[in-house]
Each structure stands twice: as C-alpha cells, then as structure tokens.
Image (cartoon, rainbow, N blue to C red):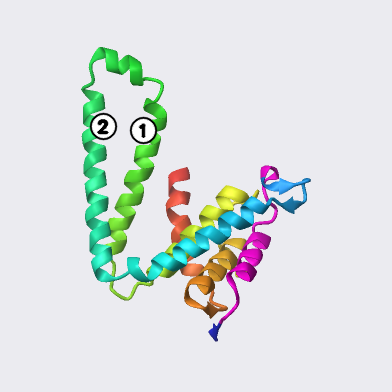
Amino acid sequence: MLRSSRRGLETITAEIVGNLDPLLECWTTNGKQPNPEVAAFVLNEIKTFRDAAPKHFKRRAIRETRGTAQGIINAIDRLERQMRDASPEMELRLRYYRTDLSTALDQVRRECRSAIQSSHIGGKKDHVKEWVAKVAATLIRRFSAEVPDSGSSDSPLRKIAGLAYEAVTETQDIDLKRACDAELRPTESSRR
C-alpha cells in the first residue's frame, strides 16, 4: 500500500547516505563517518532532480530530448570521421587522448540512444521511476564499496531508488524493482 510522505529532504538524504554503507574509504572521515560532502552531494542531486522532474517528463520535453540526443549522436559521428581523416600532425597531437575520448564518446552515444529509445516507449511509462533508479545506481557507483544490485527488496539500490522517488513524488514505500533491473541491464551486457 502506498503512503503519502511529508518527510523532509534532509531526513531522506540521511537514509540514502546510510544505504550507501559501506562507503569507499575516500568518502569517510576517520574511516568511519561519512564525509559531509557525501550528504551535500546527495541532497543537491535530489533537489535538482525534484525541481526538474515536473518539467522534463512532459511530452514536449521528451520530444526535445529525443531531438537533442539525435543531434549529439550526429555530432559524435562527425567528430569521429574528422579524427579518422586527421592530418599526420593532428594524429600525433591527439594520440594520447584517443582511447579516453573514444570511450567517453561511446558512453555519450549509448546514453543518447537510451534517451531516444525511452522516448518511443508507451505513454504510460513512469520516467521518474526510471530516473530515480539511474540516480540510485550512480550514487552507489560513486560513493559505495558495493556494486549496485536489485536482487532483493532490501538491496541498497532499491532502497535508495525508493527514497529518491519519495523525495520527488512524496509517495512512500514503493518498490522499484523493475526500474532498478532495467537500469542494471545495460551495465550487465556491457561487461560481457
């Protein structure tokens, strides 16, 4: 049963940080307490997402996102063609950046394709659920020593996604297994 929530963002942020445990050592103070930067980052991410969500998931905004994503893919394709056809001097200048740049451009291209694909899926899709799962996985990858996993309802990924969803929608006690599983799917296939 869904319950309405009026809990403050600071309370939800503290719960999210608690679910990031164990933190990577670089994000702790004295090896035990979370560095205050972790809570500040989480709070800022939640506030930013909460403020943006109502505007960004309307049909018009989704169409704009699809157009922007395709434009970025086209720009990446043009850049890669230019780099393949570069002069010998430019080849020398860019050789140290090529691998990192190629990896980053592939990631951007994948994200753009995901945005395009997401915009074509049926109208009843809850984009907020999709995004809180993405935010939760990103927070775990950045701060936690754990790997994101949505196997059980007690997994940090599902708890953090649920807390982020609560912060945005004021709906408490929602299990976002499907959204979390979907968020992990591309990661699992890219490991192979």
Which element is circle 2 on?
helix
**Would you place residue 147 above or below residue 19 in this image?**
above
**Would you place residue 175 above or below residue 18 in this image?**
below
Can you see residue 71?
A: yes
Badge 1: how crowded within 10 Å, few (<14), some, or many (20+)? few
Q: Quadrant of residue 54?
A: bottom left
* Residue 110 percent across, percent down from the top left: 34, 47
146 lies left or right of 60: right
**Would you place residue 135 above or below residue 83 in this image?**
below
- Which residue sits at x=67%, y=53%? 36
Q: Amino acid at mark 2?
A: Glu
**Which residue is disc 2 drawn over?**
80
Q: Which residues are magenta?
A: 5-26
* Residue 152 percent across, percent down from the top left: 60, 67
**Which residue is disc 1 drawn over?**
102
Which element is circle 1 on?
helix
- Which residue sits at x=41%, y=21%? 96
Can you see residue 152?
A: no
Q: Amino acid at mark 1?
A: Ser
